[in-house]
Every structure is written in C-alpha cells, then in structure tokens.
Amino acid sequence: MKNIAEIITIGMAVATTAFIPSSPPLPTSTSLPIRRASSNRQSGGSSTGIFFRDDDVADVDVEQNFQSKMRNIVAQRTRRRREVVRPPNVRGAVSLEEFADAIEEGRREGKLVVVRFHATWCKTCHAIRPSFDRVASSNPQVTFVDVPVLESNSNLHQGLGVESIPFGHIYHPEMGLVEEMKLSRKSFSEFEDLVKMHSTTSS
C-alpha cells in the first residue's frame, strides 16, 4: 500500500500535466509559400528546384506571344514594301514582246525609254530602286521600264548583251540605244545625268 507522500507526488504530476498548454501544430509542406520541385541528387537533380515558380508555363506563353508579334511586324513591313506606289511612268516587261512594245511605243510617241535590268535576289538592285523611281518622278515625259531576270526571259537578256545586274539602257526615239552601263549606287548619279541629257534632245 502506497504511503501518503507517494500519493501526493503522483497527484501533483498528473495535475501539472493536465494544465500544460498544447503546442500549435507545425506547418505542413502544403502550407509553404514556395513549391519545392522534386529533385534527386543521384539522378542529376539540382537543389535550385526550390526557386521554381508555379507560373513557369506562363513564361512559355509570353515567349510565344513575343514571337507571334515579331512575325506580325515582319509581315506588315513586307506588305508595305509590296504596296509602295511607283510613279505612273514606270512599267514592267517580263518578256521579249513586252520589252519590244515599250521601245516601239517610245519611238512612236517621241519619248526617251530608260530600262533597268534587275533581279529579286540582287541586293544592289533593291538599293537603287528608290533612286530609279525618284528619277522617274522627276522626268514624267520619259518612259521607265523594269525588266526582271526570270527563267522564262533569259533569251531577252542574252540577246541584249546584259551580262550583269543591275544594268541600264537608254533608248532615244530616233537614234535607238544610246547608252548602256552597269549600275551601282556610286554610278547611278552618272546614269541620272545621262537621262537628263538625252531627255532634252528627245523632246
């Protein structure tokens, strides 16, 4: 039989335990503000996984939207280049018949005919096109003809002795071919002077 001292000691211990406040529960992993990506050091995983965000997929969408915007800008600029309004006295000729018609029409009407031989893949041709159009705008009494290099009209360039591009011809209504020269950004001013000189003699 337990004595009174032991009973008192046991009772005090029980009473003390009953009044100890319970500790708050520890936060679980689902309550953490940062999602920890699963990583395994043995399989090559990195501890930097804790910096992964839940909106990683949104970053991919942003990149795709950026690429889409860039493609739209390029397409708009391409359309603008195609929609450039050229002077009304500039015409095209893609065949020997069209070229001959332009020269004959200039002869009948007493007009000077200025021809530019070019190609779509030629950078210099693209560079001097604005200058060609500017000269055409400054000389509305002259007919300007653009002749592109195509597989279907190789006989036209060979027959006219055009060995390089861009290349220029000037046809006088009475004297025929009066000038032929290789064109470039440096030499185009000389070609422009020749156009002005011959346009005064043909009018």
Image (spheres, rainbow, N blue to C red):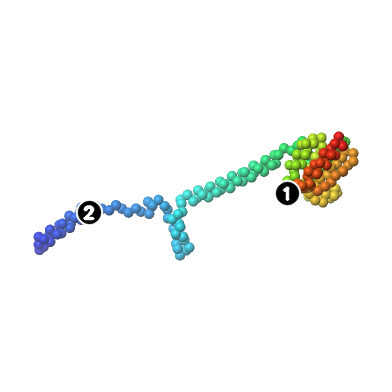
Q: Nearer the viewer, mark 2 or mark 1?
A: 1
Identity of the residue furthest to the bottom in this view: 42
Above/below status of 13 relative to 191: below
Q: Quadrant of the N terminus?
A: bottom left
**Mark 2 or mark 1: whose residue is earlier in sequence:** 2
Report the residue at 46% width, 50% height from top: 54
Amino acid, disc 2: Ile
Q: Secondary structure at mark 2?
A: loop
- The residue carrying mark 1 is 123
Instruction: Please state the horizontal and vertical placement of residue 175, each as a whole percent of the image.
Output: 90, 41
Instruction: Please state the horizontal and vertical placement of residue 111, each as a whole percent of the image.
Output: 85, 36
Amino acid, disc 1: Lys
| Count of numbered circles on the image | 2
Instruction: Please state the horizontal and vertical placement of residue 160, each as a whole percent of the image.
Output: 85, 48
Label 2: few (<14), some (14–19) or many (≥20) C-alpha neighbours in 10 Å? few
Above/below status of 165 relative to 200: below
Any mark on residue 20, and which? Answer: 2
Report the residue at 57% width, 46% height from top: 66
CA separation in Å, label 2 and label 1: 88 Å
